[in-house]
Image: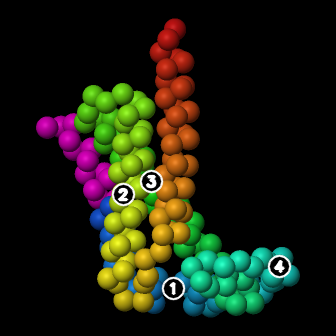
Amino acid sequence: MKKYIYWLLPIGWMSVIFYSSAQPYEKQDVKPLLDGTFNLDFLTPYLDWVSFTYHHSEVSVAALGVEGFIEFFMRKGAHVGVFFILMCLMFVALSRSTRLTFRVTLAVSLLLTGAYAVLDEFHQGFTANRTPYFGDVLIDGAGALMAAVPVLFLQRYRTKNNSY
């Protein structure tokens, strides 16, 4: 029974993600904080050349202002970080509660994290002023894949040091 206690980690983290996804955009908008706390206008000449389309909207300093531009990257960075952590917690829970091989544990951790990313975007479709977007699932998946890198290195380190 003790080995299943590790599942509280990813379940708790998924609860945090669920709560965050249930918040309307206005409750998560950090532009007023950025605008009221920092004068970011000095960044404009360094960032005004960046322009691209994401989810049918232009992402640029001209379209969003400096604060909106920075907030966009903060929000997408949060996607990466949150799902990086979730994949690590999934890996720990699986590795502590099953007898799967390392590779299978890693693959199942990635699949479960990806599945939750899809469910998270679906959930956002029911939240006011939030829209589900498959591009965010890809960003979430990138965070999960990034988490696999240190897990692989730690496994390689452990295997190397245990072979002596």
User: Residue 49's mark?
Assistant: 4
Specify the amino acid type for callout 3.
Ile
Q: Which of marks 3 and 4 is nearer the N terminus?
A: 4
Category of crowding for the residue at label 2, using alpha-carbon neighbours closer than 10 angstroms: few (below 14), some (14–19), many (at least 20)? few
- Mark-to-mark CA distance, 4 and 1: 24 Å
The span picked out in magenta is 1-13
- Mark-to-mark CA distance, 2 and 4: 36 Å
- Relative to 60, 161 lies left or right: left
Disc 1 target residue? 29
Category of crowding for the residue at label 4, using alpha-carbon neighbours closer than 10 angstroms: few (below 14), some (14–19), many (at least 20)? few
- Mark-to-mark CA distance, 2 and 3: 15 Å
Q: Is residue 47 placed above or below 111 in the rendered structure?
A: below
Q: Point out the image quarter for the N terminus.
A: top left
Q: Which of marks 2 and 3 is nearer the N terminus?
A: 3
Specify the amino acid type for callout 1.
Asp
User: Residue 85's mark?
Assistant: 3
Specify the amino acid type for callout 2.
Ala
User: Residue 115's mark?
Assistant: 2
